[in-house]
Amino acid sequence: MTDDDFKPTRMKLATITGFIEKFIAESTDKSKETRGTYRRALREFTVFFSRDRLFMFRTRDVLRYRDYLSRVKELREISISTYMTALRRFCQYLADTGVIESNPAKLVTGGRRPKSHSRTFLTLQEVDALLNSIETDSVAGLRDRAIIYVMLGCACSELEISHADAGDLKKTGDTWTLYVQGKGKTVKDEPVEVPEAAAVAIELYHKSLDVEITPSWPLFASRSNRTLNRRMSIRGIRESISQRLKSSNVKRGRDLKLTPFSLRHTAGILMAEAGYSVEDVMKRMRIEWRPTAQLYFKQKGALRSEKTPESAALIDIKPQISDIQNSASKADK
């Protein structure tokens, strides 16, 4: 699609401002913080719109706005990306409601995206050492072990895990699905297929609680005296898994580079090595920007997972080889 494919659409500033208010008001699936970000970013767009006087929702106009953010406002690349995302979502709203024919911002990228992740990944030997170091005769051990399996198999963040309830994990036939509340969202509308290994680990953890698990029960509950059986906070999850990384000797001085979020990166590379497509990775990891998912394929081969075929059980929905079942038997004894 070229710039000529976009029909020029003229608007007054007051009209644009009114549409922005409607867009934000109708973004009910977004969090308060995200709506605030949209408002701040689009306020800058209205400043540009009033100065420019030539913006007619064509690709060339969007490019001119991006140039304004870079040269006039002198914003950093990451900030430009945020402002452009807000404009892209707003233009899509206008297209969806029939105000403009197409979204011209779809063809314009934001700031330069990183060529690599700021966090590193775990080798499969380190994953094995991490899991083997966790005791299976305590509730806390079974809980942390299950969290790690969910981080690896479902590529869940601490935020998604903290928000998850037991009732968000649903089984259809032989397949488990976890509905998560993603970043910037207010509802749990992102279905994530759960590998068998993660589902079994969660089941073992819930059995160890020896209580009736209702749908509203936190998927992972705190074990501290002050917040016993209440929802784990993001900080609590991060500290628990970080401690497991340290006690297993996996960290080895990589405090800033190797974090609980590294488990997510490990999952992405493992999926790439296992033959999953870019679209599969985007869906499992809730990634909207294709180049972000492609970063995992650039690291394909780093884990050398073909040497350890049993590692497929970490990400496979119905794995052929599942060491977790053997681990479950040992934990029951």
Image: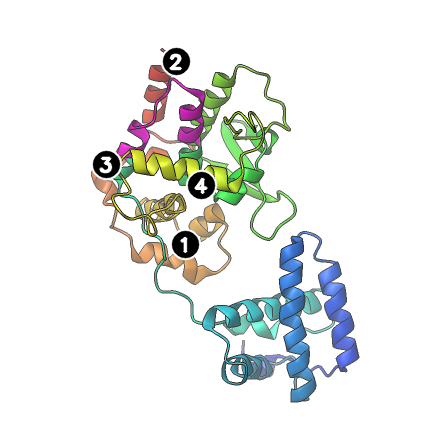
Of 174 and 108, nearer the camera is 108
Secondary structure found at label 1: helix
Q: CA distance from mark 2 to mark 3?
A: 26 Å
Question: Where residue 181 appears, x then y in whole percent?
Answer: 59, 44
Tell me the quarter of the image containing the C terminus: top left
Q: Earlier in the sequence, mark 2 or mark 1?
A: 1
- Magenta residues, start to end: 128-146
Residue mark closest to the camera, 2 vs 3: 2
- Measuring 63% from the left and 79% from the top, which residue is drawn there? 6
Of 304 and 27, nearer the camera is 27
Q: Are marks 1 and 3 in contact (CB under 8 Å)?
A: no
Say whether residue 2 is magenta: no
Instruction: Point out which mark residue 238 bears.
Output: 4
Residue holding disc 3: 308
Q: Are marks 3 and 4 in contact (CB under 8 Å)?
A: no
Question: Where residue 166 appears, x then y in whole percent?
Answer: 58, 29
